[in-house]
Amino acid sequence: MTTQIQPDAAARTGDPDAPLLTIENLEVTFRTRDAPVHAVRGVDLTVYAGQTLAVIGESGSGKTVTSRAVMGLLPRTASVRGSIRLGDRQMVGLGEKELRKCLGREVGMIFQDPARSLNPTMRIGSQLTEAIRVHLPLDRRQARERAVELLAMVRLPAPARRFHEYPHQLSGGMRQRVMIAIALACQPRLLIADEATTALDVTTQAQIMDLLLDLQQRFAMGLVLISHDMGLAASYADQVAVMYAGRVVERAPTREMIAHVRMPYTRALLDATPRLERPPHAPLPVISGRPPDLRALDPGCAFAPRCSRVRERCRQERPELAEHQPRHEWACFFPCADDTIPGEDER
Amino acid sequence: MTTGNGTGRPLLEVRNLVQEFVVRAHGGVRGGVVHAVSDVSFEVRAGETLGVVGETGSGKSTMVRSVLQAPPPKSGEVWFQGVDLATARRRRDLVAARRQMQAVFQDPYGSLDPKWTVFSIVEEPLAAYRTGDRRQRRARVEEVLDLVGLDPSVFGDRKPGQLSGGQCQRVAIARALTLAPALIVCDEAVSSLDVLSQAQVLNLFERLRTELGLSYLFIAHDLALVKQVSDRVAVMYLGTLCEVGPAEELYRNPLHPYTKALLDSIPSPDPERPRPRVPDELAGEPPSPLDPPSGCRFRTRCPRAADICAAEAPPVRAARPDHTVACHFPLSPVAPVSPARHGGDGAAD
């Protein structure tokens, strides 16, 4: 898939080349009882209309915290520094009311667990019309019509009937469709999907991803896929950013990234993923160790303690993310070469 | 005591297993009988891993719980080391069998008592079976903790809250190993772990299999993951087995349309491979196990369905001696005669 901007997107956004979302030097720190946790440590990300960016990382890599910082969904113990711009509007430092007004129409978000994102005591129709009427000047009847339209658009079977049902009457896949409908209620320009298909079955995941990409193309939305699944990123994203210990450590267009992995951490993630092409019982090449403690980080590269290519310099000095090849950035002093054999670096 | 029973019969043989639950209608959800597992037969041979894949609601977890007799199945036979657990009259037989059959579940935190230390969690099965004296137990706990890669002197006194997900899962595995079982049942045992800890635990399972001669019944929804550890794979849909075959062959040459649909749905880390493609028929939801379709249970979503699929449940047929499928219109030709059971060696009962 290419990153061609749709004509109607250009019309909507004005300048087609202007990014929808620009995150610069984002830092998020959580106050805890002992030491502060530096969950996000200087992240830069850019999302364009009609483009899909996958942010890949393990738990604790800061991918979810980054997306929640965009949505203003962090708890009070978090302090956010840096810049998050939606179009040309600065979001960091906005009051909650302004933020809501600005975000609600422009950015939609879907989460991993659709069961917990929906109110179990409200019919899905009411939850959807509520989302519509907060942001759009429609009366009850119009909002209702729009809601049924939206449910049909996300291909929920029998939308007019489902409108009157409660979340527990729907399957996981159907609930996620309802969440997508709510997120798309105001035709946002940017949609953030945080592990949105992780809890779903593979066949349902394929359908939901089809739907998301179709809607993205139709409305020329920017789409951010937050996931741990390299397969999902490789299949659906235009660009991949890999995060480790609160930083982006490698970023490139998807094909470039997978074909020419540079960062040893990305290599380790790809190698450790079970694949259909692998024969049964072949040991997975996997690195040992755990992600670092975000309360007490060493001055060097955060991945150094687990890295097979580590040298003295990596422990002393932190490699910055830089564009070493056209459109391919990595943060490593001793990157993998193209001919690094998977598994060679085991242990 | 870690291998099969040596009589040439499989370690675990499940025949015509049926599990049903009666539910009452509540809040807009219909009541009735949930047909969770319907006439399922398979076997696990000594030293092999049988993987079971299926989507949410396919009945795979209910199936393994029925095998573990927790709760016992509604009907069918579960032969384990020469004893039919489902009809074992003497409680002693069931207790003895359970010792040889241990389980590891999905939620690493939920399956460990947060107030217990790692040491007492792993020791508990020994105490429950009144095995050895205190010194022997201590030695055994240290041995199995070493085996799963946890240093007993570091982790022995910790509590689950002080461990990562991967470490908790290692504790659960150590606990399953203490009684030197022949079979370990893994129900989504690595599904909640991150890629790297998942790979570490998968490698651990493999190492234990070769070192201790263990057999596994390995349940997961991720097909690539199941292939990684399995000798044979069974595909489950809405309470029935669609297809059973050797892992490599089943993935390369699927016979059941559902197996193919599952395989086509997996996004590959190789961007050159086509994007997952789900046939239009498969769009939508699986039917409710409260009211499963007549005949073949997959027919309502099957691209190859015809009239006969609604009228008759497809018989189990063999494409090769070890590769069986329950489908009227399999994707490759199969023998016209039924060999009676999935994964069986052809011997009818």
Image (cartoon, coloured by chain):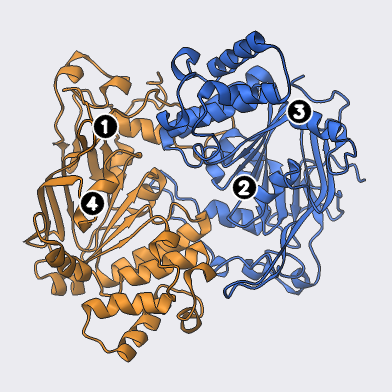
What amino acid does circle 4 point to? Leu
Query: Which dot, 4 or 3, sits closer to the camera?
Result: 4
Q: Look at mark 4 in the image and give the residue it sits on.
A: A74
What amino acid does circle 1 point to? Arg
Q: Residue furthest front?
A: B115
Q: Look at mark 3 in the image and give the residue it sits on.
A: B46
Q: What's the distance in space between the residues labelled 1 and 2, CA to CA? A: 34 Å
Q: Residue at x 35, y 63 (%)?
A: A213
Q: Does B342 appear above or below B232?
A: below
| Local SS, label 1 | loop
Q: Residue at x 14, y 47 (%)?
A: A80
Which of these two is toward me, B280 or A95? A95
Which of the two discs, 1 and 4, labels the residue nearer the N terminus?
4
The circle drawn on residue A262 is 1
Chain letter, colour blue: B
Q: What's the distance in space between the residues labelled 1 and 4, CA to CA? A: 32 Å
Asked if residue A240 shows in the view, the reply is no
Chain letter, colour orange: A
What amino acid does circle 2 point to? Val
